[in-house]
């Protein structure tokens, strides 16, 4: 049997990027031989094994044939006769279809090195169209490597367009899509992921709510970039620049969906877009079965981001309602993430990327003031049940009034 490193490990070594996970392919072996060497089998669909000591993945060389819709619709064929070249041709991109042995001898039948030099994401063969997830993968790699000059090859973008129009994207499961979306959002240039999906027509299929934002104007006074789609991309860009976590990036992506619903006669104003967008945010959340913390933050940021921007003008009672909505007493971290998303929204505007956002510290201070109200003295005064709740609220409101006065003094 012969063992090769494949995929990302080879690609990233050639790019001079640190390699994190190593995928290996085994040529000329049977399942029985692997088991006899102590490898542990994983994966029900095709033969992949874990190394008995390192735990790294070793897959038997295999070929694939499309036999139905979606990812389930594949027939795999693994046997000792499958060659390295046959295994590599089923892979998505030429830069992912190289292999090297332990002397670093490269096998590169589909010109991955040429495309690495040309900074091109190019499909290996027309079989690319057999798995619609590859549309998302290519967009994700574009987001990761845009920084070092990679773009999608025009003929690959064309295939992605055909795939998007074929209806195949709808066969993707929520789990597979979310895995790609969440990884793409955590890349350095997540906005490129959205741009590439839009360029090939996949955005319209996967997230029509975001696609609809392009071409929708906003008031130039607050939004020099005018276009709502362009604004959304900039907010994502800022979120990555400021190394925000996934929850914040997801909320940034979805915060303005309501603006896609504004009747044209009302443009460029978007009255109550915060509230109108909630049902769209909910729909996108559910479509991809986003994790609960992502779902929650996206809804809260959607509803309250303009409160964040107007923080310094909010009445103490409105400020209190905001803090209550976030349950800032038990969930301080979530409120921090809300503040971060608001700040990214404020900076994701043309020419305003480095503006100050005094609202952030003001909101933090308000949360601290409200959380400073001690319950014990109220208990000692004999408050209990709903009356206790009311008393706590009154004290918090007092604290916020004092806070606002002190801040404006
Ligand atoms: P990463 O750095 O994100 O791990 P990677 O290229 O190693 O990048 P993996 O998802 O680990 O990506 O997959 C390993 C290899 O398997 C890829 O390089 C590619 O050759 C192949 N591959 C994975 N998923 C697909 C797919 N859906 N279609 C075609 N080839 C795939
Ligand atoms: Mg990998």
Image (cartoon, helix red, strand yellow):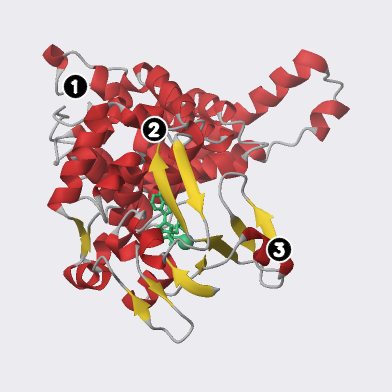
- Mark 3 or mark 2: which is in front? 3
Q: Which of marks 3 and 2 is nearer the N terminus?
A: 3
Q: Determine the CA span between mark 1 and mark 2.
A: 16 Å
Q: In which quarter of the image is residue 218?
A: top left
Q: Which of marks 1 and 2 is nearer the N terminus?
A: 1
Q: Name the residue under label 3.
A: 35
Q: Which of marks 1 and 3 is nearer the N terminus?
A: 3
Whole-percent x, y for residue 59 in the image: 54, 60
Numbered tag placed on residue 305 in the rendering: 2
Q: Quadrant of residue 88?
A: bottom left
Q: Is residue 272 rendered to the left or right of residue 117? A: right
Mark 1 is surrounded, within 10 Å at the Cα level, by few (under 14), some (14 to 19) or many (20 or more) other residues, namely: some
Q: Mark 1 points at which residue?
A: 269
Mark 2 is surrounded, within 10 Å at the Cα level, by few (under 14), some (14 to 19) or many (20 or more) other residues, namely: many
Vertical placement of residue 157 versus 306, above or below: below
Disc 2, SS? helix
- 400 and 172: which is toward the camera: 172
Mark 3 is surrounded, within 10 Å at the Cα level, by few (under 14), some (14 to 19) or many (20 or more) other residues, namely: few
- 59 and 222: which is toward the camera: 59
Q: Which quarter of the frame holds ligand 1?
A: bottom left
- 1 and 12: which is toward the camera: 1
Whole-percent x, y for residue 357 in the image: 35, 48
Q: Is residue 391 rendered to the left or right of residue 168? A: right
Res. 314 in view: no
Q: Is mark 2 within 8 Å of ligand 1?
A: no
Disc 3, SS? helix
Numbered tag placed on residue 122 in the rendering: none
Whole-percent x, y for residue 65 in the image: 39, 43
Residue at 27% x, 34% y: name it: 203
Res. 355 in view: yes
């Amino acid at each position: 049997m012969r063992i090769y490193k494949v995929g990302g490990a080879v690609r990233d070594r050639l790019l001079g990027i640190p390699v994190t996970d190593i995928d290996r392919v085994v040529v000329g072996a049977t399942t029985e031989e692997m088991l006899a060497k102590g490898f542990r089998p994983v994966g029900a669909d095709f033969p992949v094994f874990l190394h008995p000591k390192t735990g790294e993945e070793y897959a038997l060389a295999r070929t694939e044939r499309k036999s139905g819709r979606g990812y389930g619709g594949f027939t795999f064929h693994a046997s000792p006769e499958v060659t390295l070249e046959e295994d590599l041709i089923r892979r998505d991109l030429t830069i992912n279809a190289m292999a090297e042995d332990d002397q670093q001898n490269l096998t590169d039948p589909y010109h991955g090195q040429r495309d690495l030099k040309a900074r091109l994401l190019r499909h290996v063969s027309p079989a690319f169209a057999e798995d619609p997830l590859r549309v998302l993968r290519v967009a994700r790699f574009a987001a990761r490597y845009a920084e070092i000059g990679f773009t999608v090859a025009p003929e690959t973008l064309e295939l992605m367009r055909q795939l998007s129009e074929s209806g195949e994207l709808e066969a993707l499961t929520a789990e597979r899509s979310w895995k790609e979306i969440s990884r793409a959002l955590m890349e350095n240039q997540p906005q490129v992921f959205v741009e590439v999906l839009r360029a090939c027509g996949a955005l319209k299929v996967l997230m029509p709510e975001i696609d609809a934002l392009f071409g929708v104007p906003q008031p130039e006074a607050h939004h020099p970039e005018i276009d709502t789609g362009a604004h959304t991309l900039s907010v994502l860009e800022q979120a990555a620049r400021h190394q925000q976590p996934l929850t914040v990036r997801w909320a940034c992506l979805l915060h303005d969906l309501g603006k896609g619903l504004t009747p044209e006669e009302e443009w460029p104003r978007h009255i109550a877009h915060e509230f109108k967008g909630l049902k769209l945010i909910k729909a996108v959340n559910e479509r991809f079965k986003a994790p609960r913390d992502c779902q929650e933050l996206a809804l809260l940021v959607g509803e309250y981001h303009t409160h964040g921007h107007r923080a310094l003008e909010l009445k103490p009672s409105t400020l209190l309602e905001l803090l209550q909505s976030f349950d800032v007493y038990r969930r301080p971290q979530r409120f921090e993430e809300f503040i971060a998303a608001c700040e990214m929204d404020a900076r994701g505007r043309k020419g305003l990327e480095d503006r100050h956002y005094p609202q952030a510290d003001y909101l933090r201070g308000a949360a601290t003031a409200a959380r400073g109200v001690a319950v014990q003295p109220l208990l000692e005064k004999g408050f209990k049940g709903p009356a206790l709740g009311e008393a706590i609220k009154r004290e918090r409101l007092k604290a916020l009034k004092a806070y606002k006065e002190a801040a404006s003094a």
